[in-house]
């Protein structure tokens, strides 16, 4: 091999090429980790009603580590998403020194018992609010179904100017709704839409005209519903035997 100039030239070129690549790689590492390329600007976008400037500044000060090139976007995103009202964060580098942060907040739909909140997508999250919200109570993992059910009840009951303020879903998937913190409506698990429609249709000429408050209505009857009336009042409906 040593007496073959062509092979020696090829080997020399190969070694020279490897040396150039190693030099460029080392230079790139120096540039990437150089303090000459810090993140100087952070632009935050999003409709923020609950996330505060102080919370954002804390994340920027304590969680953003590295230069423009070495900043770990995944860890940075997770740091922002630890804030109570933050649902989702998108990050993007903008040359030469800017980080764009787009934040989506949770929009609270209801309280989940006394231990959390449910957003409009049916997702449970932990945050604090003084806003008067309806309460949902149901089995673990039923948040999405309950959010959908609550919205349906709310929209349909608006016709008779009543609002669901507390909604229960049992382990057997039976529904119960409290209206305006007073009237409790037992819907059950079967024919939910039909039963509620029956109640809404009858409401203006029955419950709406009672002078004294009614605390409980049971819709689990095939041909009507029962009403729990205060002592001394005549019942509106005499129902047949209750259906399952």
Image (cartoon, rainbow, N blue to C red):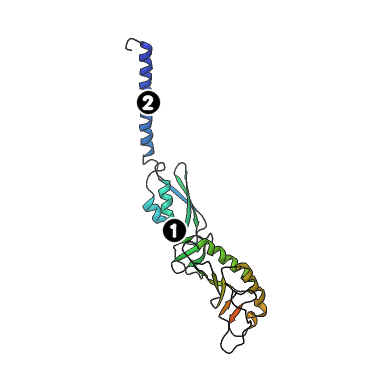
The residue sitting at the top extreme is 3
> Between disc 1 and disc 2, whose residue precedes?
2
**Residue 183: which quarter of the image?**
bottom right
Write down the residue under mark 2. 20
Mark 1 or 2: in front is 2
10 Å crowding of disc 1: few (<14), some (14-19), many (20+): few
Q: Residue at x 57, y 75 (%)?
A: 185
Q: Vertical placement of 173 versus 8: above or below? A: below
* Left or right: 143 in relation to 159: left
Q: Residue at x 36, y 11 (%)?
A: 5
Q: Which mark is residue 81?
A: none
Give the SS element for disc 1.
helix
Q: Vertical placement of 94 versus 89: above or below? A: above
Q: Residue at x 60, y 79 (%)?
A: 226
Image quadrant holding the C terminus, namely bottom right
Q: Which mark is residue 53?
A: 1
Q: Vertical placement of 40 versus 228: above or below? A: above
In front: 127, or 214?
Answer: 214
Q: Position of residue 45 (x, y in %)?
A: 50, 53
Q: Residue at x 37, y 14 (%)?
A: 7
Give the SS element for disc 2.
helix
Distance from the alpha carbon under mark 1 to that under mark 2: 48 Å
């Amino acid at each position: 091999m040593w007496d073959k100039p062509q092979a020696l030239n090829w080997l020399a070129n190969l070694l020279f090429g490897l040396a150039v690549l190693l030099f460029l790689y080392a230079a790139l590492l120096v540039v990437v980790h150089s303090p000459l390329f810090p993140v100087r600007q952070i632009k935050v976008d999003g409709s923020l009603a609950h996330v505060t400037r102080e919370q954002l500044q804390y994340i920027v000060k304590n969680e953003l580590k590295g230069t423009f090139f070495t900043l770990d976007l995944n860890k940075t995103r997770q740091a922002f998403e630890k804030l109570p009202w933050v649902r989702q964060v998108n990050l993007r580098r903008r040359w030469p020194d800017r980080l764009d942060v787009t934040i989506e907040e949770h929009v609270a739909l209801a309280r989940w018992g006394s231990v959390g909140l449910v957003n409009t997508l049916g997702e449970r999250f932990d945050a604090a609010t003084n806003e008067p919200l309806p309460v949902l109570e149901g089995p673990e993992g039923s948040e999405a179904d309950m959010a959908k059910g609550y919205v349906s009840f709310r929209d349909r009951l608006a016709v008779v100017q009543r609002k669901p303020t507390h909604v229960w879903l049992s382990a057997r998937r039976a529904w119960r709704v409290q209206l305006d913190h007073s009237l409790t409506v037992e819907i059950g698990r079967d024919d939910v839409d039909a039963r509620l429609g029956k109640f809404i249709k009858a409401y203006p000429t029955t419950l709406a005209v009672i002078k004294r408050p009614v605390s409980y209505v049971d819709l689990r009857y095939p041909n009507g519903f029962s009403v729990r009336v205060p002592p001394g009042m005549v019942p509106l409906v005499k129902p047949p035997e209750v259906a399952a």
